Image (spheres, grey):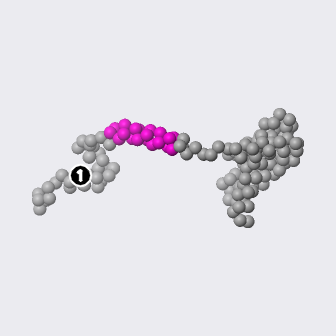
Amino acid sequence: MDIESWKTKSKQLRTEVVALYLASKHPRTPWYAKVLAALIISYALSPIDLIPDFIPVVGYIDDLILIPLGIALLIKIIPRDILEECRAKAEADLSKRKPKNWIAAIIIVLIWLLVIYVTLSLMWPLVFKQCEPNDLAALSLFFPDFLDFQILDRIDVSQRF
């Protein structure tokens, strides 16, 4: 399979999932289909599985089998006319989707960077205040080489010999 066929299948899957969501909210959808849709969604999003995911290979098999089987069953029990109506609405909704707003994303990132900068500028003096001689001795307990470098910086080389 080439990349284009994967993209086509991905687009169809996205349309089908949106259509199933719309069908689960449709007033003429039977109650048992709505319950099954809620169970499938809750199982897919739940951290609790029948077989835990940390078990290699087998842990993901339940997700790969149960969720698609549930979706296939859901497609079978939703009346065809409701499903077709919801598929058409899903295609229309996905086709007229607005492009991503990169300006809003950049503004949000800049706001977060500003918050980080202000937080660091306020915290920096508190965390890295000017060290007193007693602080240097305390630091040497945790970082033995720290005090040696501080002393070497203060000692005149001519006095060492």
For label 1, the SS is helix
User: Who's the residue at 11% across and 59% down the image?
Assistant: 158
User: Who's the residue at 86% across and 37% down the image?
Assistant: 30
- Within 10 Å of disc 1 (Cα), the crowding (few <14, some 14-19, many 20+) is few
Picture quarter with the N terminus: bottom right
Q: Quadrant of residue 153?
A: bottom left
Residue furthest bottom in the image: 1
Picture quarter with the C terminus: bottom left
Residue furthest top in the image: 27
User: Who's the residue at 14% across and 59% down the image?
Assistant: 157
The answer to whether 14 is drawn above or below residue 158 in the figure is: above
Q: Give the image location of residue 25, x and y in percent.
A: 78, 36
The answer to whether 62 is drawn above or below residue 107 in the figure is: below
Residue 39 appears in the figure: no
Q: Main secondary structure of the magenta part?
A: helix
> Viewed as shown, does residue 34 lie left or right of 42?
right
> Viewed as shown, does residue 143 lie left or right of 19?
left
According to the image, label 1 marks what residue?
150
Looking at the rendering, the stretch of residues picked out in magenta corresponds to: 106-126
- Magenta stretch containing residue 116, yes or no? yes
Residue furthest front in the image: 96
> Viewed as shown, does residue 73 lie left or right of 62?
right
Disc 1 residue type?
Gln
Q: Give the image location of residue 115, x and y in percent.
A: 44, 38
